[in-house]
Amino acid sequence: MDSSADAFAPPEAGWIAVSPRLATARRVTLVLVYVVVVAGGVVLALAPLPVVWLVVYVVAALAAFVWTWWIIGRRVRSFGYAEREADLLVVSGTLVRRLVIVPYGRMQMVDLRAGPIDRWLGISTVQLHTAAATTDATIPGLLPADAAALRERLAARGEERTAGL
Amino acid sequence: MMQPRRTSPLSPLVQAAPALPAAALFFVGPGAAIVERSGIPFVVLAVVGALIGYAVFVAVAWLAWWRRTFWIDDDGDLRLDSGLVQRSARRLQLSRLQSVDIVAPFLARLAGLVEVRVEVAGAGDSRIVLRYLTRAEADSLRGIILQVTRAEESDDAPQPEALAQVPAGRLLAGLLLRSVTAGLLLATILLLVVTSLSQGPAGLVLVIITGGLPILSVVTEFLGNYDFRVARTREGLRIQRGLLSTQSRTIPPDRVHAVSIVSPLLWRHWGWVRVTITIAGVEGDEVRPDVLIPVAPRDEALRLLAEVLPDVDVDALPFESAPSRARWRAPLTWRSLACAITPQVIATRSGRITLRTSIAPHARVQSVRVTQGPWERRFGLASVHADVAPGPVDVAGRHLAEKDVAALAPREVDEMRRARLRG
């Protein structure tokens, strides 16, 4: 297929990728979830049930773990953003691909946040809000300095654009 | 200008009326024991109990009535003082009058009373409801208010001009023939036939759901949208509707973010459509209107649409249709899927049984989204969404050719910027 047919074609400047630490953060969360899953397995092992149940449980849990581990890597690599002159582009997703284009003039608020695991690993998330609830412009996995700078730039550009009204 | 006066002395009787059944129920519970011991008939007990309860509520409402006065002061403001212990004084600037409505709720009508609602433009204290006045009092009060308003305005304001009205018969027919309602009612009839033939009671439970839900929704919507009227006022389109209680709402044209023209299969024979609408929210706003007209001939609906979205020719939108390979992704609806961009608006079309055309002005679109699921990717399709303020309208061009989407998305972003520059 020629490039003009690609609805997700990168802008001239290309996509800026997010930090691979995001994958680490999500894998840490995955491991934490699996603490509960393993606990469930222990209960199952102690329960007076046929062994086949336990085997099925372990195989399913392992398969889900490996698959999620792998898909986290792909998803994190799929994130990208680009600041153009008048708008911000955010691309994400592997199975379902998404591209969001938000003109700076439509931004109402720029959020900067980081959960405990994010802070520990040194990454944060920038999210743009418009008057529409369906606008889904979230850039996770930014280094704190980059995130703060990005938010400042976005806020400044937003003011510049709305001031022209 | 006008001496402080009270609402009609019958008001407490009406206001306390909802307490009657509650009081009756309250006395029925403990009453059972008394019935057994004293032999007082059950009905007598219920009635007496209800009357005592009612009397208490009337007494409270009477005190509130006695302390509630309204008048128009020398500045031309409508004032309302009320409150038994905690006094409250409200004041409406009549120079910003938006509407004076006389409404007759069901119970008040039985006592020959009406309710007067006065609304002014602007946030905050913008509304006073006077419960209840006699018809004559209400008419004279409205006369005085309009006179005050007119005195303050040099040019005489144009009277609201009626634009559309929905007859009760059409409303009922329209509600019954909506796709989901008609489908459920049909399913109910089939279930009833099957159950009566097989003589098994199992289906009856389902019948209650399939029959009950649509009937409930038809009744609610019928009561809510009864006598639906749209008029043009200085502030925008005014919508009045309702049977048991009347609602009056004004739609300022600059707050319309998106509209949708909905046409269910069974309506198309008469060429009826419904128009839903997304109005931008304001903090602390009451329920916003989301229907511009519940059921109307297409021409009439389009005339109303032109009031809120001028310069848009709905019948001449340059739609880009989904390619025929979209049938593999949307076997039922692929024929109608389309998206159009004009200098003023972005429009999308979808649905088969119920056709929807959604339109949003570029100046109101907040962001553009492109999405592609695995199945879409397999057939070289993609979807483009124009994100608008939360509401009933969803502007999405689904399952279009990916190369069309690759052109439509940047074009919409361009138009959004241009609309912004125009202001």
Image: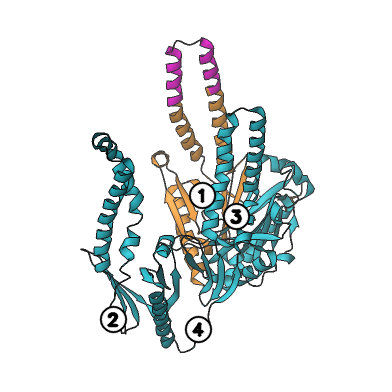
Please tell me which residue lies in front, B98 or A159: B98
Residue at which label 2 appears: B3
Identify which residue is drawn at 48% across, 39% down. Answer: A21
Do discs 1 and 2 share a chain?
no
Residue at which label 4 appears: B157
Amino acid residing under circle 4:
Ala
Q: Relative to A101, is A94 above or below?
A: above
Residue A150 included in the magenta stretch of the image: no
Amino acid residing under circle 2:
Gln
Residue B41 seen in this snapshot: yes
Amino acid residing under circle 3:
Asp
Amino acid residing under circle 1:
Thr
Front label number (1 vs 4): 4
Marker disc for residue A138: 1
- Mark 1, residues whose alpha carbon is within 10 Å: few (<14), some, or many (≥20)? many
Marker disc for residue B291: none
Q: CA distance from mark 1 to mark 3?
A: 21 Å
Which tint is chain A? orange
| Residue segment shown in magenta | A36-60
Do discs 3 and 2 share a chain?
yes
- Mark 3, residues whose alpha carbon is within 10 Å: few (<14), some, or many (≥20)? many
Q: CA distance from mark 1 to mark 4?
A: 49 Å
Rendered cyan, the chain in question is B
Q: Earlier in the sequence, mark 4 or mark 2?
A: 2
Residue at which label 3 appears: B394
Dominant SS in magenta = helix
Determine whether the residue tagged by mark 1 lies in a helix, strand or loop: strand
Determine whether the residue tagged by mark 2 lies in a helix, strand or loop: loop
Please tell me which residue lies in front, B389 or B249: B249
Q: Chain of mark 3?
A: B
